[in-house]
Amino acid sequence: DRGWPGPSAPAPAAGSPTPANRCLIAGSALDVAKLERALEAASTAGAGAFAVDAIRERGTLVQFGQPADDRTLAQCDSRANVITINERLRGRSSSVLAAHLAHEGTHVAIAAPRPLDRGSIDEEYQCRVAQDEVWSALKGNEEDGDCDANSRLVAAGERYAKEKLRSIPGYADLPEY
């Protein structure tokens, strides 16, 4: 998620950052191609277009790496303007990566005017809705435990989802808005 508070984002992976419109993608040629495909897929699916536009407009660095917490699948460090997708997701499909990029890109869009803010429960909920929209549009018959669990949370409704988010360490002290 936003990865805030926490250490600065890790240095870009080996290889030179490559522009994809105005965002930067760091990593090996395979990583760059995989993340470019995922960004393109996300841009075709509902809220994903909004998220990808924000990533590109802000010049956000997108990379595989190790988030501050190993349990975190992806995080947006608004201060450093970096999205890090957990290295464990490298082998996942473009649809899975697109869903996570929609989530983190929504953080980019919402946090742009206030990069030092820790966010809110409402922001996290909106990011999860964006993730669900992209995942639902792209997955076809594919299953992914993390994306499917997020979809179930969103389907349960805003009130329930926000209650569950408040019970997650790191979110409990966030303001509602």
Image: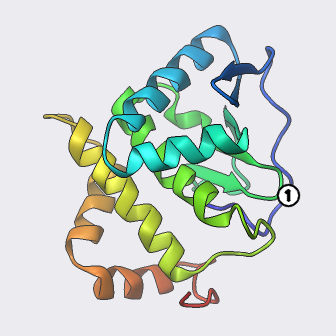
As helix, strand or loop, the secondary structure at mark 1 comes to loop
Q: Position of residue 166 (x, y in %)?
A: 49, 86
Specify whether 11 is left or right of 135.
right
In this picture, is 56 found above or below 159? above
Q: Residue 114, how many percent across, how many down?
A: 75, 70
Quadrant of the image for the N terminus? Answer: bottom right
Instruction: Determine which quarter of the picture holds residue 29.
Output: top right
Q: Is residue 145 among the parts visible in the rendering? A: no
Q: Residue at x 70, y 21 (%)?
A: 19
Picture layout, residue 123 above or below residue 135 = below
Near-viewer residue (115 or 12): 115
118 vs 21, nearest the viewer: 21
Measuring from the top left, give residue 132's x and y in whole percent: 31, 55
Q: Which of the two residues, 147 or 177, is positioned nearer the viewer here? A: 177
Residue at (60%, 65%) from the top-left corner? 110
Please give the residue where the numbered disc 1 appears in the rendered image: 7
